[in-house]
Image (cartoon, rainbow, N blue to C red):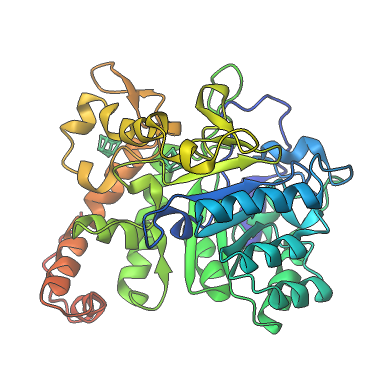
Amino acid sequence: MIGISKLYCGQVEPSDALRYGRRSGALPSHLLQFSEDKKPVLVWNMTRRCNLKCVHCYAQAEGEKGEDPISTAQAKAMIDDLARFGAPVLLFSGGEPLVRRDLPELARYATSQGMRAVISTNGTLISKQKAKELKAVGLSYVGISLDGTRELHDSYRKNAEGKPSFDEVIRGVELLKKHEVEFNIMATVNECNVNFPAEFYSSLKELSSFVQFTPVVERTARGDVATWSVPPEKWGKFLCTIFDEWVRHDVGKIFVQYFDSTLANWVDAPPSVCTLARTCGHAGVMEFNGDVYSCDHFVFPEHRLGNIHSRTLTAMMYSERQLQFGKNKHDALPKQCHACRFLFACNGECPKNRFAKTQNGEEGLNYLCQGYYAFFEHAAPYMESMKKELEAERPPANIMQMLRKNELNIHRQ
Ligand code: SF4
Ligand code: SF4
């Protein structure tokens, strides 16, 4: 594997092209999608600074050094507003949130106001001291960005000097484990690691029983698909390969968010990933300066809902505009999706990625459609079987035994 991926991925250099999309990075969306009382939750991009310079990330230009535009006192005032709104979860994101030295203090403040504080981090700045602090402040979850094996990860995630970051991430993970801070791995799938699904999956499940990954789909300012984006056909093969391993060996042991969400849609339950849900708009995003937008994938002027200093979060997140943003996910689907037999499972995926044309030339098809369709078609008989188990109030994990005994009549070409 090591030699092969090196050959395949080569040295990927960051592009200077302006990004069309906001980010393809992974967020712990199982926390963002549905709060218990259906209140929208908030991602707070509290800094644009970052100590890494990942190929696919918008934050790379800002660097680690510099001042943040809001002070600790201003940040606490924002948290006060969120508490009045009754926000159940506050996700500190960035940039890299741990470049702010006051992050533990702010997380403590958020938890003291009754919120679940969560951070999404590249993991490289987690020192022994920081791990202790994160444990002490009652942080409920740390999402770590890690994209597979050392070589797969280091192809895209380097620091400003071009040095790899894998070892530092693993050191951070080990410190979190040692200090009993709950964490999960959040991976991105790009044009490189998509070619190594088996290695990717086994490396992630070694670290965590919760496997979450997000396809990278980015466009340049000219509208071209960025070269580091995952190609649709490969995305389908990637999902199918990991699914085949999971469905035979790991159901009930390893939580793979895409498969869990697909099964949820199969049994008409809410999926845990927003991209496969029927509507959007459950998780707003607040920029470091208090501007609030409809979603982390839509930080564009036309999706600005207001500023926390002049408008309450309640007014913004329950505004007609935000509700319409949520409904548009379904309403704006092209005819091909409405006629698709897997619409219930796919829901046209993320509107950010709908820039392809349908077979009839209609705008608005998801760029990854081919991959998703292939995956749903592949997974369908297994999903049907797990659905039957659930309906009979038996664990879907029974499918593994059925496959071992050859009891499922699934024919593959
Ligand atoms: S636009 Fe919708 S599907 Fe895409 S990330 Fe936002 S909430 Fe999720
Ligand atoms: S698989 Fe393709 S056609 Fe079907 S709902 Fe998804 S994006 Fe639309």
Q: Is residue 111 left or right of residue 133?
A: left
Instruction: Specify the quadrant that holds the N terminus.
Output: bottom right
Residue pictured at 69% horizontal, 40% vertical: 55
Q: How many marks on residues? A: 0
Q: Toward which corner of the image does residue 361 lie, by quadrant?
A: top left
Q: Toward which corner of the image does residue 306 lie, by quadrant?
A: top right
Q: Position of residue 67 (x, y in %)?
A: 87, 42
* Rendering quadrant holding ligand 1: top left
Q: Is residue 174 left or right of residue 310?
A: right
Front residue of this view, candidates 403 and 23: 23
Residue pictured at 15% horizontal, 60% vertical: 411
Q: Position of residue 189 (x, y in %)?
A: 53, 49
- Whether residue 359 is visible here, answered yes or no, is yes
Instruction: Specify the quadrant that holds the C terminus.
Output: bottom left
Q: Is residue 146 left or right of residue 251?
A: right
Q: Position of residue 298 (x, y in %)?
A: 52, 32
Residue pictured at 17% horizontal, 72% vertical: 390
Front residue of this view, candidates 371 and 76: 76
Q: Is residue 193 left or right of residue 250?
A: right
Q: Is residue 371 above or below residue 320?
A: below
- Whether residue 193 is visible here, answered yes or no, is no
Q: Toward which corner of the image does residue 144 lie, by quadrant?
A: bottom right
Front residue of this view, candidates 214 and 44: 44
Q: Position of residue 16 (x, y in %)?
A: 73, 27
